[in-house]
Amino acid sequence: MSAQAWALRVLDSSLAGAASGRLKDDKSRLQESVQAGGKRAPTYRLVASAGPDHGKEFVIEVVVDGEVLASGRGMSKRAAEEEAARGALEKLGL
């Protein structure tokens, strides 16, 4: 793939995200949506981690007002939190 084709693909996805209002990451969107509804900010808790130090997989749950909304897996805690937030947004229809 040429540099021009790559740049156009990246810009195209960025513009599509901007058009759909998805400039913020899922954790930020979830926090803003939940707090706008009068609830406390989501918390993320580590449920499990497995694998060697250089290749751990993390499982994280996102909790809002004592209710587990979703869980996520990832090779970093941040990635697992993002996946959990994405699942919570889907569950809430956002």
Image: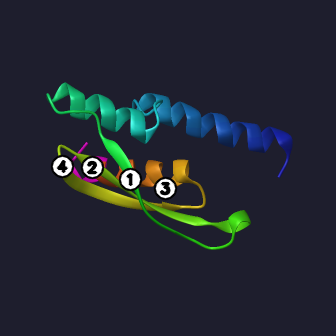
Residue at x 24% of width, y 56% of height: 68
State the separation of the CA atoms marked 2 and 4: 6 Å
**Where 77 falls versus 55 (above or below)?**
above
Q: Earlier in the sequence, mark 4 or mark 1?
A: 1
Q: Residue type at mark 1: give it.
A: Arg
| The disc label shown at residue 63, or none | 2
Q: Residue type at mark 4: give it.
A: Gly
Q: Classify 10 Å Cα crowding around label 1: few (below 14), some (14-19), many (20 and above).
A: some
Residue at x 41% of width, y 41% of height: 26
Q: Tell me the residue that label 3 is attached to.
A: 80
Q: Earlier in the sequence, mark 1 or mark 2?
A: 1
Per the image, label 2 sits on a secondary structure element best described as: strand
Residue at x 53% of width, y 52% of height: 77
Residue at the extreme left? 38
Q: Residue type at mark 2: give it.
A: Val
Residue 33 forms part of the magenta stretch:
no
Q: Which residues are magenta?
A: 89-94
State the separation of the CA atoms marked 4 and 1: 12 Å
Which is closer to the viewer, label 4 or label 3? 4
Residue at the extreme right? 2
Per the image, label 4 sits on a secondary structure element best described as: loop
Contact? badges 2 and 4 (CB < 8 Å): yes
Q: Tell me the residue that label 1 is attached to.
A: 45
| The disc label shown at residue 82, or none | none
Q: Residue type at mark 3: give it.
A: Ala
Contact? badges 4 and 3 (CB < 8 Å): no
Per the image, label 3 sits on a secondary structure element best described as: helix
